[in-house]
Image (cartoon, grey):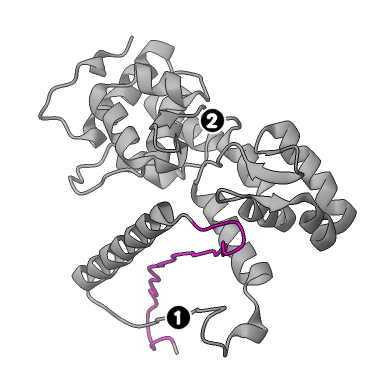
Amino acid sequence: MLSTETPSETMSIKQIIAEDIRKYSEEMNIPLRQLIKDFAKNTNIVLRTMERFFEDNKKFTPHVTTIVDVYSQIYSTNSLAEILSKSPVIVSDFIKKNHMQFIGGSTNKFLDISKHAAVQAELTSSSIFNQIYIMTSGDYGTDLAKIKEQFGANGLKQLDEMIKLGFVEIDENDQVKRKTRLTWDRKIRKNFIKTIIGDIYKEENSDLMNPNYISVAIGDVTPSDYELIREKMRSNYLDIMEIVNASKPSYDEAIRFTLAKVIEKIEFKAEGDKLC
């Protein structure tokens, strides 16, 4: 058992996780450096992120999906329920507060991870998978006939695979509805953004007021202003999701939309002339 099941209240979540990884390294008799490499290899956590757990950086707070991935390795499970029951209270509370993609409805009931994140990343490399997944969101899902009309035989084949994997189901009225949500890690987010921009966003509607809105901001800002922009984007996104959760449209008036938020810090480091 890990010693941090009852960690000190003064420990940060970063320190708790680092100590659990160290204890696991000792229990498994695997050198710490090798273990963090293995964790990075077996999950979608980049090695640099794993290294940050052991650096003296008080500002570093790992993303919740990173935390879930770490404990999935420590406890050898893909079950979120098991991770929540076994991890330190501070860690499990953090997951419950932030890992909204695993919450079903208003009951706050957590769903087990049906597939490893790496497998889901491979699935979402398919634009058809992503588009069907988006079409099945909301209370009403989508019609089976719409999938057949839009994607043909390939779409029906992909749909059959999604049903087998437990992501969607078909009711008695041939409505295809969401059953299990994906794990939103970095590769999956990237795959969906590529689908939204490349296959869903309609260029011909770009000059119309309602169907589309896309904008790009590029510039130089101070580190503090960058953090301010990031927090404003996060706040606005949460406000929008509150509207989505509160909105209860009828079947005939329901409008499905996609909203992707992306902020990318780009650093150019070069000697000599400035880059143009």
Nearer to us in this view, 195 or 170: 170
Nearer to us in this view, 77 or 268: 77
Q: Amino acid at mark 2?
A: Ile
Nearer to us in this view, 186 or 248: 248
Nearer to us in this view, 90 or 208: 208
Task: Estimate the x, y position of residue 266 in percent, counting from the top left.
Answer: 40, 71
In the depicted structure, whether residue 19 falls above or below residue 231 = above
Decide: marks 1, 2 in contact (CB < 8 A)? no
Query: Which residue was labeled with disc 1?
Result: 216
For residue 77, say whether it is visible: yes
Q: Amino acid at mark 1?
A: Val
Within the magenta stretch, is there residue 254? yes
Q: Quadrant of residue 247?
A: bottom left
Magenta segment, which residues? 249-275
Q: Secondary structure at mark 2?
A: loop
Q: Residue visible at 45% across and 38% down?
A: 105
Q: Residue visible at 27% across and 44% down?
A: 61
Left or right of 19, for residue 216:
right
Please tell me the numbered disc located at residue 113. 2
Please tell me the numbered disc located at residue 137. none
The N terminus lies in quadrant = top left
Task: Estimate the x, y position of residue 175 in percent, counting from the top left.
Answer: 71, 46
In the depicted structure, whether residue 2 falls above or below residue 254 = above
